[in-house]
Image: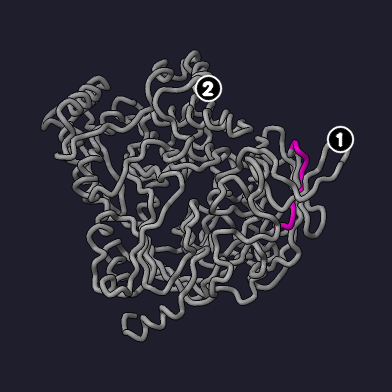
Amino acid sequence: MLRRIAAATLAATLALPAFAQEAGDDAIVVSHGYSYFGELKYGPDEPFSYVNVDAPKGGEISLSALGTFDSFNMSTRKGNPEPTASDVFYDTMMIAAADDPYAIYCLLCTTVEYPESLDWVVVNLRDDVRFTDGTPMTAEDMKFTIDLYLTQGIAEFRNVFTRYYDSVEVTAPHQLRFEFSNETPVRDRMGLIALWRPFSKSWFEETDARLDESTLEPFLGTGPYKLGDLDVGRSVVYEKKDDWWGADLPINQGRYNFDSIRIEYFADSAAAFEGFKAGEYTFRIENSSKEWATSYDFPAVKRGDVVVETLPDGNITTAQGFIFNLKRDKWQDPRVRDAIRAMFNFEWSNETLFYGLYERPESFWGGSELAAEGAPGDEEITLLEPLVEEGLLDPSVLSEEAATPPVNDPASNRPDRRTRRAAQQLLNEAGWEAGPGGMLRNEAGERLELVILQFSPTFDRVINPYIENLRDLGIDARLERVDRAQYIERRRAGDWDLTNHSPGQDFEPSLGLKQWFHSETAEDSSRNLMALADLAVDRLIDAVIEAETLEELRPRVRALDRVLRAQGFWIPQWTNSEHWVAYWDMYDHPEAIPPLDLGVLDFWWFDAEGYAELRASGAL
């Protein structure tokens, strides 16, 4: 949910305000929230409708993670952070509901005040917010945090966000005034306020901590949990605060129900699954079709001690895939990329390896009305024609259908002869010819090497057949599987040819697109990891950011989606439109899961009676 706030910064039709007051010629809106398109769904004293406001509090939930960790700081590229910390240690200024992609609501604030132009926004902070050590949060802490991110934050964040604030001023002990620069897109301005999560200014000054350094001492936050037991790299427990300031707010009713959250780390997925079966942790979100189809018949499942459940997922589909490292010259030629893309046989993989449980993603906005389909419509053509006239796009984009992955025969891993011949011809046209041993070489005699970087052995059974197909073409392809720490470092350093990435997007794309796909983040970004730098893409991103209504946004995103897919930097792998979960029968959830969030740590709860029965039977 927090990801949607940070990436969102959406388009703006004004929310129905709590009230409005006149200031000169401009009406000032005062409201407990903001809706980018339409009206707010929830009033200032309403809990979210999908939660169980009577959910019992208490108990522990435990989940697994792979690899290791040596930091609690997600805001630096140093170290291996423990990702759960960011969701439980800190509160953001405003939060989103899991049943509405277009609204955000005050959490650390009581109201926001702004003119229709959104040239400025005044934020009225709650005066009862407390940090973990009991000290009060003030406007000075919030301003300090913003300044910290704009000076010590990762480069890709600073490059995009620094220029959007003319000033951030403390106007009262619990009030801030944000002034935006003229180049700040109007529909992003409230999102540029909503994302902030405060740190304690005095704590940073006393400890000399830095945002750009790895640390095992969490920054002081205002969130519902604090650090409990810690076994560095192996496990961590987050404990609910007894005196959390936000416990009684209407917006938090039915939420944060567990007394503790435990994360157990395992070396690989096989060890993690065995740990779940043995009750070493008690909640599992399954991401392997093989395990889901074949492994959930162990004794605890048959006895009914473990619940196995499929739950709906209404989000935009995950655009999981391989991406090319475009910083390497050999991947600049789209013919080479197209040839390599054609050699991944999803249909065979799905039938043979995935038990027919997956679909192949085709769009960065799959499953939504933002995805490009078929040939472009008139509104898309209006956007694309100037780019064609300037030579930034091939004219075929105006008439051809949106690019989709090739469809292969599921009977054999090898793509059909026609596909292989076409791929071979593309490589030859790009200057790669068969040399000694049948391996492709360029004019300089260099082999066409391709290293697929991975850390999880789960992918071996998928990647090895793909490598066989690539080697059949004469490509010197190989899998390099390293430990997680090396994996993170090599990705950062660009020491790879293909690696996994999930550049899927949100319902409200805007400024976050620059971190994913814009030229200005191509040199150093954890999102634009492929180093995409294309003027046509940049121009379309600008058009999306400038959209003011849903009617403007949709065709602009479709045009962008169409061009991104035509770039060929992404080899779609597979996707799943459901949540696969298994858990020891000691948890419960609302009858209807909201479309945008599974919410395991948010609105599930502990069933003490179920836990007692498991203990009494000796199951746990």
Residue 10 falls inside the magenta stretch: no
Horizontal arrangement in the rendering, residue 45 relative to residue 325 (left or right): right
Quadrant in which residue 466 is drawn:
top left
Distance between the Cα atoms at labels 2 and 1? 35 Å
Q: Nearer the viewer, residue 537 or 379?
A: 379
Q: Secondary structure at mark 1?
A: loop
Q: Amino acid at mark 2?
A: Glu
Residue 478: percent from left, percent from top? 22, 43
Q: Amino acid at mark 1?
A: Asp
Q: Nearer the viewer, residue 552 or 39?
A: 39
- The secondary structure making up most of the magenta span is strand
Determine whether label 2 and label 1 are within 8 Å by CB: no
Q: Residue at x 52, y 63 (%)?
A: 602
Height in image: 140 above or below 279?
above
Horizontal arrangement in the rendering, residue 355 relative to residue 166 (left or right): left
Q: Residue at x 34, y 31 (%)?
A: 404
Residue 473: percent from left, percent from top? 17, 31
Q: In the orientation shown, which residue stands out farthest toward the top? A: 389
Q: Residues within 10 Å of mark 2 (few under 14, many from 20)?
A: some
Quadrant in which residue 68 is drawn:
bottom left
Q: Residue under label 2, please give it.
A: 379
Quadrant in which residue 402 is drawn:
top left
For the magenta stretch, what is the residue range? 109-117
Q: Earlier in the sequence, mark 2 or mark 1?
A: 1
Q: Which mark is residue 478?
A: none
Residue 111 falls inside the magenta stretch: yes
Q: Residue under label 1, please give it.
A: 25
Residue 347: percent from left, percent from top? 23, 40
Q: Is residue 443 visible?
A: no
Q: Residues within 10 Å of mark 1 (few under 14, many from 20)?
A: few
